[in-house]
Image: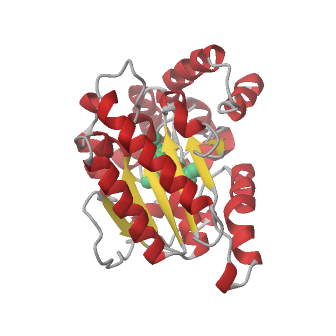
Amino acid sequence: MSEGYDWGRAEAEVADVPQPGLPSARPEPSLTTVGAPSLFEVARPELTFDDVIDLEPLQDRLSDLFLQPFRRSEPANRTFSARVLLYGPPGCGKTTLARAIAGELGVPLLRANGAQLADLYAGESEQALRELFDVARVNAPCVIFFDELDTIDSEPSRARAPWLQGGIRQLLTELGSVARAGHQVAVVGAATRPWAVDSLLRREGGFQTALFVRPPGASARREYLERALDDRVDLDELARLSEGSSGADILQVCATAGPRATTQEVAQALAAAGPTVASWLEEARAAADGLTDDGLLDDLRSYLESA
Ligand SMILES: Nc1ncnc2c1ncn2[C@@H]1O[C@H](COP(=O)(O)OP(=O)(O)OP(=O)(O)O)[C@@H](O)[C@H]1O
Ligand SMILES: [Mg+2]
């Protein structure tokens, strides 16, 4: 939980460190927002679905949920209220997709981190959430992005539960409020361990839909490699060898090896990095077997059956 939270990684992510050849390398002009508390940041992403590798079927569903309703209606009475949870292994595109949704819509993205909210004291998380949604309403149309939602958990067995319950209740109240027509605030949540997301947030009134952001298949892995490496390397062979790696893993390996690395050098670097997605899939399979609920993991189950 929050004790084990990796602040170094979170800071690196928030800083949007530019990496060669990545869509995230583009600077995002930040918005000046009156009263924005420091617990969240506001950006205007320029990323679009074209920048996202693989994931086309998912993009179609996101388009139905976010883009079509927004584009169909007149600016004055736009309906804009989807609340979607994106889940999947680390480094496969959850944050990238949230930014691309805002980028496609051409609206600001307000990004809050679940772990930071979970670290607040009693009462403070309610206040922070009220402020976040107030800023969202002022900046509407916009998208709120809750990252690391699996770190806010008010289950009674958890040590931090008592003061998180207020935060969860406040979040449900705010989600209910923006779900009503006319607010033009959409909400995207992200979790690597969706089964650990507070069950209240998974029920009606919380996030309405959960979508699996799958790990890259062979052709997607080839695309990552192709973007990052010299064309003299054997892309098909490296795509085969990178099975079990996330997009972020592959890009990291390629950045370390350098664009002119040979097939053998990249192969060695991939072997040293190891298949990080495999351990996630193992944990996810056990969770999917044990969880008989609400359709939360339906996408994951179909993926595991076909894998
Ligand atoms: N589907 C994708 N398309 C394009 N780039 C991607 C994709 N998946 C990952 N990346 C690249 O890898 C980096 C990490 O991806 P991202 O932050 O979207 O992963 P995540 O699923 O949010 O991971 P985490 O669970 O660690 O937050 C991004 O900066 C992006 O450049
Ligand atoms: Mg992320």
Number of disc labels = 0
Q: Position of residue 281 (x, y in %)?
A: 57, 24
Q: Quadrant of residue 112?
A: bottom left
Residue 160 position (above or below residue 178)? above
Q: Residue at x 56, y 62 (%)?
A: 178
Q: Residue at x 35, y 22 (%)?
A: 158
Q: Position of residue 175 (x, y in %)?
A: 53, 54
On the rendered image, what quadrant is the C terminus found in?
A: top right
Q: Position of residue 26 (x, y in %)?
A: 42, 70
Q: Nearer the viewer, residue 61 or 250?
A: 61
Q: Is residue 154 left or right of residue 35?
A: right
Residue 275 position (above or below residue 71)? above
Q: How is the image coloured?
A: secondary structure
On the rendered image, what quadrant is the N terminus found in?
A: top left
Q: Position of residue 111 (x, y in %)?
A: 40, 59
Residue 70 position (above or below residue 57)? below
Q: Is residue 262 left or right of residue 131?
A: right
Residue 148 visible, this angle:
no
Q: Nearer the viewer, residue 12 or 107?
A: 107
Q: Nearer the viewer, residue 247 or 306?
A: 306
Residue 76 position (above or below residue 302)? below
Q: Residue at x 38, y 18 (%)?
A: 157
Residue 161 visible, this angle:
yes
Q: Is residue 283 left or right of residue 69?
A: left
Q: Residue at x 39, y 70 (%)?
A: 135
Q: Nearer the viewer, residue 287 or 182?
A: 182
